[in-house]
Amino acid sequence: ESLINRIAAGEIIHRPASALKELLENSLDAGATSIRVTVKDGGLKLMQIQDNGCGIRQSDLPILAERFTTSKLSTFADLSRLTTYGFRGEALASMSHVAHLSVVTKTRTSTCAYKAHYSDGKLAPAQPGQSEEPKPCAGNDGTTITIENLFFNTPTRLSALRNTSEEYARILDVLTKYAIHNPKVSFTCKKAGSSSPDLNTPSASTTRQAIKMLYGHTIEKDLLDTTVSEKTKDEEESWSSEVYFTNANYQAKKTVFLLFINSRLVESSRIKRALENVYTGILPKGASPFLYLSLKVDPRSVDVNVHPTKKEVHFLNEESITTRICDALQEKIAEKSH
Ligand code: ADP
Ligand code: MG
């Protein structure tokens, strides 16, 4: 059974950056305004994420890493975002099957923090022979999750991820994208033992400032933005989007593409290709744009059966929505180049 669990976990947690993505989403769901990440050996030895969010209640700690049982525990008020994807409640469980997982957490109303260790979906003692009960400890409001020795029990997976600097680059890439999507949240990332962070964003900035800070100041003068949305017959918004994209003067070597659907970082090669095609005849051959698209759709229209093994997202009316956005981009690029 534990082997099956490990295999299942590996489908969700492919590498350190995919674990980090899940942890980031949890911190953001918890309302954090500050997220601090510390990494050792590309996240394989250690990945720690500290947030100042709502914390986890002591009474919720025993089931925290149980599969499917969670669905945002009692401290989490906004249940509406849950419906977005169909594989919720598996992230921490998965991590507990393929890593050493520990949690220190404190809610605003609790007088102290609690520390808990997990293994194979359950509370576990910190040291063999000790009690597995969460222990009271000192700590700030919020949650610190520590993942150590990722894939220690899946040697094949581990040996496929030997390039720790590549894994670290992927971690920074995920953080950079979330920092752009959440410009009001302060993010830092550093290697364990280092005093200077490799990524450090202020809180309360704007999307434009965040892009400029993270993708280089030269992008600023060439950066356009627009919003596109559609209303239903009864004037309700059926979808809306916010796009930041470069003009004809900006020429990257490779397309930078950030896609968030309902605030989750997702991939869609079809949407990417469609947006890139807007630049055909606008950019010289070999030159590529920067594209950030944040799309809000009815959570029920996103494929809820999508499994994490399927990286590509699908949603209702994808083609017509994409076309509308592409048209808006084309128009704006043309307008600005006159
Ligand atoms: P899901 O996010 O899909 O519910 P997870 O396994 O990622 O499943 O997390 C399980 C639960 O643990 C969450 O629903 C949430 O209640 C709680 N949780 C996890 N991380 C945090 C955090 N950083 N702050 C507050 N609560 C958290
Ligand atoms: Mg989660």
Image (tube, grey):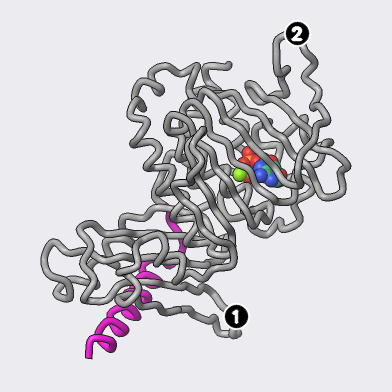
Q: Which residue lies furthest to the top in this view?
A: 129
Q: Is residue 291 above or below residue 68?
A: below
The boundaries of the magenta stretch are 313-338
Residue 209 horizontal side relative to residue 24, left or right: left
How many numbered marks appear?
A: 2
- 20 in the magenta segment: no
Instruction: Find the distance from the CA under tag 1 to the CA under tag 2.
Output: 59 Å
Q: Is residue 150 above or below residue 28?
A: above
Q: In this view, does 330 lie above or below 99?
A: below
The residue at the point 31 percent across, 65 percent down is 290
Q: Residue furthest left?
A: 285
* Three-letter amino acid code of the residue under disc 2: Gly
Where the N terminus falls, by quadrant? Answer: top right
SS label for mark 1: loop
> Within 10 angstroms of label 1, few (less than 14), some, or many (20 or more) residues?
few
Where the C terminus falls, by quadrant? Answer: bottom left
Mark 1 — residue?
236
The residue at the point 50 percent across, 16 percent down is 153
Q: Where is residue 168 in the image (x, y as percent from the top left)?
A: 40, 38
Q: Where is residue 93 in the image (x, y as percent from the top left)?
A: 62, 31
> Viewer-proximal residue, 67 or 39?
39
- 331 in the magenta segment: yes
Q: Position of residue 302 (x, y in %)?
A: 51, 58
Mark 2 — residue?
129
- Asked whether residue 35 is in view, the answer is yes
For the stretch drawn in magenta, what is the main secondary structure? helix
Q: Residue furthest front?
A: 195
Q: Which residue lies furthest to the bottom in this view?
A: 338
